[in-house]
Image (tube, rainbow, N blue to C red):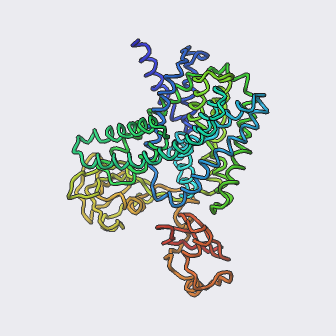
Amino acid sequence: MDPTFTLIGALMLVFSIVLSPLSSRIGMPVLLIFLAVGMMMGEDGPGGIQFDNFELAFLIANLSLAVILLDGGMRTRVETFRVGLRPALVLATVGVALTAGGAAIVAWWVFDLHWMMALLIGAIISSTDAAAVFSLLQGRGLHLNERVSATLEIESGSNDPMAIFLTLMLVTLIGQQDQGSLWSGLVMLVQQFGIGAAAGVLGGFATVELANRMRLTPALYPILVGAAGIAVFSATNAVGGSGFLAIYLSGVIIGNRHVRMMPMILQVHDGLAWLAQLCLFLMLGLLVSPSDLIPLAGAGLILALALIFVIRPLTVLATLWPFGFNRRELGFISWVGLRGAVPIVLALFPIMAGLPDAQLVFHAAFFIVLVSLIVQGTTMAPLARKLHLEVPAGEDPYRRLPLDAPAAGDHELMLFPLRGKNWDTPKPLGQLRLPDNTAVAGVFRNRLCLQPTKELEVSSGDMVAMFATPALLPDLGKALSGRQAPKHLAERAFFGDFVLNGDALLGDVEQVYGIEFDELPPELSLAECFAKRTKGHPVVGDKVILGPVTLVARATEADRVTKVGLKMDA
């Protein structure tokens, strides 16, 4: 292998990583920076690299997407399925088909193509991209309400089979003019979803069992999980299923079961997912020449804007209206129809099949991804805050270290840095309201480890080491949090001054606070009020306005609000 090739590749990675902090400063998606660096190093840029090996690009892209989906699946909490699964699956199937049809009409008009090729463009750009969605939701400091975040994450992780089915069926129909292809395409759709789902669940449970039964060097557990995930992905593709769906579901199973060394696995896979995104978008940038995009810029812009402002919103309204989303949530989900690597990868199919106008299809897909990342990616975080879809988040530990000892059970060693105004005044350890079944392991200050005692005072700049289980992380994070949240996300500003149990009756609240709720019967509990307004799936941050009072869901458990904040109108 030419050492110059590896040198250039390594320097591209370094350059992209060095530029990545610009993402948060200028509000640009970091994936767009990686894509731009790849284009700069391509044949039209100063790098002058000529790369047109579509078969190699297809292989790298598939492996990269598999790694990204595995990491995203492991970070998806199964509890979110109660509110996000059904609407996400409707969006991932019916929504993809409606998007493909709408985009095809516009593509037929602006590109003056045969209607079959227009349908192919519509199918290729019909699915949202998991890599882009996971990156922007998890990397921009957004803590959205569970109904919105769960729907977006599950949709982006599960809508690839439908897009792949439509793309492959149309490639077959155009290339072979086979009249039996429609029936074979429907069979393929069932195979994609059915085999992919079954293989993903079985592969996930098998990986969990394997990891828990093996006694390995800690560093090998992340490699074992990654290798098992790629094996599930490849095997599922080999038997005609959706490898993308399979590896995502495997990740969900692994991330929601007790797995030895899980914090280390997540930490390593976070780095692997970033490496996969870097390699994927740099390579896709190399594949395209900016000079090829200029001739179709006008038509491509019309299609991209139609997709963003018309097709996606109409699709979301048509599919999600029965599921109890409010207007702000529907508006945000409509806006976050992010296109990323998947449409570009799907656009490689017609090139490898040698279809007419295949290059036009590829460049159109690439242009639409660029517009989507620029327009939607840069405005997603500000729009979420403007629509008040954020909810308060607790402090995450700086580091989590699993103990991996039978006597310790699920306990981990967690490091919490103390920062913010709450810790400007020193507080004795004995006065901290720490959850039960936790213990202070030590306090680090100025490179010294201090013995924890009830009298020891801690303040800003200290780091507290805690023994705790993952289930206690939310309560522990709140107890040790000190960062100054935005005014609208401060605990009292968001939830109100009073905390009530979800089982409290409206009649009791009326007597205690001197309020009259004429529109609802007094024997109704606060939890039942939320169930009526949210169609049975309340999430933290949901609000019920009753006259001069606003009830805010503060904590939920199994589709029931357990803690309610009460805000009195001034």
Nearest to the observer: residue 333 or residue 511: 333
Drawn side of residue 257 relative to residue 570, left or right: left
Residue 415: x %, y % from top left? 33, 51
Nearest to the observer: residue 59 or residue 449: 59
* Relative to 205, residue 277 above or below: above
Residue 298 makes an appearance in the image: no
Drawn side of residue 410 relative to residue 396, left or right: left
The number of discs equals 0
Residue 269: x %, y % from top left? 39, 40
* Relative to 158, residue 329 above or below: below
Residue 537: x %, y % from top left? 55, 65
> Which quadrant holds the C terminus?
bottom right
Residue 255: x %, y % from top left? 39, 50
Residue 460 makes an appearance in the image: yes
Q: Please, which residue is most extreme toward the front here?
A: 180
Drawn side of residue 417 relative to residue 76, left or right: left
* Relative to 290, residue 105 above or below: below
Nearest to the observer: residue 17 or residue 491: 17
In which quarter of the view is residue 533 placed?
bottom right
Nearest to the observer: residue 147 or residue 553: 147
> Which quadrant holds the N terminus?
top left
Residue under the image location 55 percent in, 86 percent down: 508
